[in-house]
Image (cartoon, grey):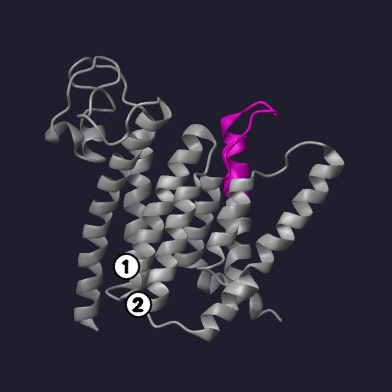
Amino acid sequence: MEEQAIWTVFLCFWLAVLGAALGSFLDCAVSRWAAGRPPFRGRSRCLACGHTLGAGDLVPVFGYLLRRGRCKYCGEPIPRECLAAELAGALTLGCLAVRFGPAPELGQWTLWAALLLALSLTDQARQLIPDQLLLALLANRAVWFMVLGHGAPQLTAAAKACAVPAALLALVLVLEKCMDREVMGGGDIKLLFVLALYLSWAELLLALLAGCLLGLLRAASAHRRNDAAIPFGPFLSAGAVCTVCYGGPVLDWYFGLF
């Protein structure tokens, strides 16, 4: 038991480090892509002064905090989105390490979380969920389905979970017909179908509820105009991560009421 705890702490630390670095890398790639530049080509530079950044300038989280969120060459503020992406990556992978420990399933969920982080940053930047990332999530589940030796019970659970986005899609189509405007983006619906391959129907409902609550809190804190669109992909992804890491006790408590 003690050895298991040591391995879990070890994994949590290094996966948090990996997550922070991944968040920094993906934020840089997505920001370049959103600006119409090649996402994986060229050295990192300060957006204000154009100075090329070295390895010491790119240390995730601590580099931002030690320099108080400013470029050391020109003093201009570094976008807070950089720190947010690094923290999101560190917290997500660290929590997954605590949840699964040194188990084979951790590989599936680590790749899953990395793809959701890339998807969330893309949706935040351009209000777009690329089909390529959804297909990557699908491929990740298919590969680990075979690696982990899953069978008919998991396929049945996935079919039941797909009823959730199917019902939501029907509701959205009716509402859009009645209101004559878009109610929910098609990318969000497709993301729900992909998440149904990973989560049970109850977990998917909890993830959807958590994503809605997080989105409402963000909208309330941002003081946006009523007609300003807020991408739902990041909040749905965050709700899914919270459900995977902490949703078990919540669902056990809820179903225990009946």
Dividing the picture into quarters, in which one does residue 47 lie?
top left
Query: Which residue corresponds to the image point at 82% horizontal and 50% vertical from the top-left?
Result: 174
Q: Amino acid at mark 1?
A: Gly
Front one among 123 and 256: 123
Q: Nearer the viewer, residue 29 or 231?
A: 29
Query: Where is residue 184 drawn, in percent x and y?
Result: 68, 44
The quadrant of the rendering that contains the N terminus is bottom left
Image position, residue 36 (x, y; %): 40, 26
Which circle marks residue 147 in the picture?
A: 2
Label 1 close to label 2 by CB (< 8 Å):
yes
Decide: is 94 above or below 217: below
Mark 2 element type: helix
**Within 10 angstroms of label 2, few (less than 14), some, or many (20 or more) residues?**
few
**As drawn, is 18 to the left or to the right of 150?**
left
What is the spatial separation of the Cα atoms under label 1 and label 2, in whole angstroms?
10 Å
Give the magenta range: 212-232
In which quadrant is the C terminus drawn?
bottom right
Q: Nearer the viewer, mark 1 or mark 2?
A: 2
Comes first in the chain, label 1 or label 2 = 1
State which quadrant residue 78 falls in: top left
Question: In the rendered view, does 151 fall on the left or right side of 55?
Answer: right
Question: Which residue lies most toward the right here?
Answer: 178
- Answer whether residue 110 is magenta in the image: no
* Residue at left offset 45%, top offset 46%: 119
Q: Amino acid at mark 2?
A: Val
Task: Name the residue located 24 percent from the left edge and 41 percent from the top edge.
Answer: 60
What residue does disc 1 label?
107
Q: Position of residue 200 (x, y in %)?
A: 57, 72
Q: Secondary structure at mark 1?
A: helix
